[in-house]
Image: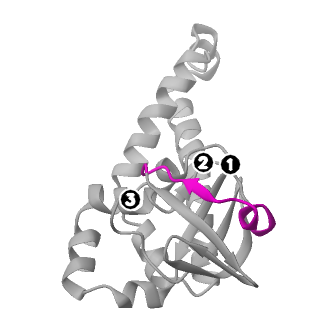
């Protein structure tokens, strides 16, 4: 709910700045408050839909734990509005963590946000380009070493188990570990 409220507040500012609430709009509409509210709701729904698309991609690719986790925070804020690469931990990665550790991460939105930022790179990097790199810098400030051994691509201590899943303005690579430590 915090995400929708924040989105609505930002959209109010954009609509006001863009002149959506000009005096002629008030005169023409009779009750501009209803019109602005409808525009805000429609815009918020579009933002929520784009965020929901990423969660849906996670679910469609068997990443149920990650899909649940991203619903707890504003994932759009984590990945940003520009191109991105998301190293998505698979369900086995979540199961490899101590139950108490995962409970702490999932119960604290700030900590979850920090952990997920360690999985995001602020540029779109497909598997071919990734295999040519020696490291990537995440939005969480972590440098992850990239190594390739025959057909196996490693990001830090994680293996890429599925690559090149396209999403709006980004790409997802499924990995078998969670980057918990920074």
Seen at 39% across and 41% down, the residue is 6
Image position, residue 48 (x, y; %): 54, 55
- Residue placed farthest to the right in the image? 128
The 10 Å Cα crowd at callout 3, few under 14, some 14 to 19, many 20 or more, is many
Residue sitting at x 60%, y 76%:
154
Give the camera-side residue of 97 and 153: 153
Local crowd at mark 1 within 10 Å, few (<14), some, or many (≥20)? some
- Helix, strand, or loop for circle 1? loop
Q: Position of residue 158 (x, y in %)?
A: 52, 78
Which quadrant of the structure image shows residue 95?
bottom left
Q: Which mark is residue 122?
A: 2
Kindly report the distance in space between the C-alpha atoms of the residues bearing marks 1 and 3. Answer: 19 Å
For the N terminus, the quadrant is bottom left
Q: Left or right: 55 with respect to 140?
A: right
What kind of colouring is applied to the model shown?
one colour
**Discs 1/3, front:** 1
Between residue 182 and residue 112, name the one nearer to us: 182
Q: Which residue is mark 3?
A: 73
* Labels in figure, total: 3
Give the residues in magenta: 126-141
Q: Residue 83: which numbered mark, if any?
A: 1
**SS assignment at label 2:** loop
């Amino acid at each position: 709910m915090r995400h929708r409220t924040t989105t609505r507040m930002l959209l109010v500012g954009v609509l006001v700045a863009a002149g959506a609430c000009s005096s002629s709009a008030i005169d023409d509409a009779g009750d501009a408050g209803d019109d602005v509210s409808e525009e805000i709701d429609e815009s918020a729904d579009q933002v929520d839909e784009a965020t929901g698309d990423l969660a849906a991609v996670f679910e469609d690719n068997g990443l149920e734990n990650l899909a649940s986790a991203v619903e707890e925070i504003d994932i759009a804020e984590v990945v940003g509005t520009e191109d991105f690469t998301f190293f998505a931990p698979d369900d086995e990665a979540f199961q490899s963590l101590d139950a108490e550790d995962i409970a702490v991460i999932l119960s604290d939105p700030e900590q979850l946000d920090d952990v997920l930022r360690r999985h995001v790179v602020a540029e779109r990097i497909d598997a071919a380009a990734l295999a040519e790199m020696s490291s990537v810098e995440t939005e969480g400030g972590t440098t992850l070493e990239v190594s390739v051994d025959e057909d196996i691509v490693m990001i830090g201590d994680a293996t890429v188990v599925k690559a090149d899943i396209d999403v709006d303005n980004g790409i997802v690579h499924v990995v078998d570990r969670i980057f918990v430590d920074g």
